[in-house]
Image (cartoon, grey):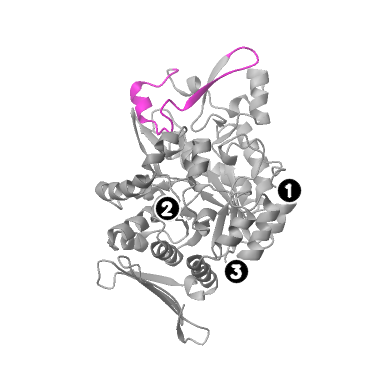
Amino acid sequence: MKPISNQAMLITYADSMGKNLKELHTVLHQHFQGVFGGVHILPFFPSSGDRGFAVINYDMVDPAFGTWEDIRRISQEYYLMADFMINHASIRSDEFQDYMAHGDASEYRDMFIDWNRFWPNGEPTEEELERLYRRKLQGPYKEFTRADGKTVKLWNTFFEEQVDIDPWAPVTQRYYQKNLERLASYVPLVRFDAFAYASKRPGTSCFFVEPEVWDVLDIGMRPLQEHGTQMLPEIHENYQIQLKMAQHGHWVYDFALPMLMLHALMAGRSDRLIHWLQICPRKQFTTLDTHDGIGVVDVAGLLTDEEIDFVRDRVNQKTEILQQYVKLPGGIIKVSGAKARQYQLMSTYYSALNEEDDAYLLARIVQLFTPGIPQIYYVGLLAGENDVETLKQLGEPRSLNRHNYTLEEIAQRVTHPMLVRFYEALRFRNTHDAFNGDVTVDNMGQQSGLRIVWQKGAQRACLTADLRSRAYQVTYTDENAVERVL
């Protein structure tokens, strides 16, 4: 198992770059030598929905994808990250099925959060309900009828195939221990999916509730610490939460960069982006795209409401005609009281930039110079356009950015001249020692200017760019301290 290193990480499903893990391994060897040091393989376990995030059990790799031996083979060449759903489990899991079958006599009864028992008065008041951070138009619960005929209402934050679990229950902690220990034997980094939703307390938003959220983190970290495995919390919310996590020394995501980068390129100004690059955490993984949408709420305060609307309107304009096909809006909205607002933009990053090669390449180069380790989502790696046909078939808006590529499609796509330059830049980013040093950022005295300089001793790497014209240049010192142009 390879340890975490300061090299770019690929994000992919097990069956999105080829049909399975063996084909993924082949693709990495054939087309992306030196491009990545790490791989985040999105949930590869048996699952009942949400593209793998309704995990039935962590005991095995889904046979459609391969085996633990396939995971081990990849882990010998790349540092890996795997997902653990700290907030929920599948309703098809053995634990939940046992509870449905045996009711209050089940050893797993306390693992699942009874909605009525959770609230002191049996149900939330209108004020308490409005305070909740919700991801569905209806309340975050679902009713189930047990084998004994009793109907129970349980916490259900996200999708129909998932049910929330109680991190403070001893039975849940045993569930964490068993499954996290197994993952820690294969990967040096575990992503805690939906982490902030696990900190529930009556009368609060039930999202990143302090001090409870730190207790949840301690509970989840115990099985990992025994193996030296690290944790990355998945939190799509205001950037200040990421800053707070970083102050505690944890890895965090840079979910603010995607919207800031879009704004910089669309508006032709660098000030908002530069401000973030100067204050953002250094121990972070940077993103422009992920398997979810482009986060909107993350940049509140870094962009004004008008600037956010400017970017949102530009991206939504391209997908507005597709809204007629959307059947599952739950993943793209946030509910506050009775109001719903767009939580994420649904688009590939390439399509968000109107499939303009020069703008897209510059966005990626800036990401490579941003403090932190760059994560490259597989659709973005191939500059994929919105997958309209899959959206029409599934009605899931996130499917626009989840196209599964065949080996033939990949072989054709990687020859695109813009992508060839992108992969060359990734190899450079992975190997130049300057990126292990210090960084400075400024605008060179120009509204649309951007300069990012990394320096470690005599080693230097510098990006200068004009966000309006999309022109850029990367210079660096070679092993003999001679300055060269990439």
> Crowdedness of circle 3 by 10 Å Cα count: few (<14), some, many (20+)?
some
Q: Position of residue 429 (x, y in %)?
A: 50, 70
Question: Is residue 143 on the magenta stretch?
Answer: yes
Left or right placement of residue 306 versus residue 363 in this view = left
Q: Which residue is mark 3?
A: 34
Residue 198 picture location, percent across and down: 50, 37
The number of discs equals 3
Q: Secondary structure at mark 1?
A: loop
Q: Amino acid at mark 3?
A: Gly
Separation of residues labelled 3 and 2 (CA atoms): 27 Å
Q: Who's the residue at 42% across and 53% down the image?
A: 351
- The verdict on residue 329 being magenta is no
* Residue 16 appears in the rendering: yes
Front position in the image: 466 or 375: 466
List the residue tagged with mark 2: 351
* Secondary structure mostly seen in the magenta stretch: loop
Q: Quadrant of residue 354?
A: bottom left
Residue identifier under label 1 = 67
Magenta-highlighted residues: 122-150
Disc 1 marks a residue whose amino acid type is Thr
- Dots 1, 2 in contact, CB < 8 A: no
Instruction: Give the residue displayed 31% in from the left and 61% down from the top.
Output: 275
Residue 419 on image: x %, y %? 50, 65
Above or below, 161 against 224 in this view is above
Does residue 329 lie above or below 453 as drawn?
above
Q: Identify which residue is drawn at 47% across, 60% down.
A: 283
The mark that comes first in sequence, 3 or 2, is 3
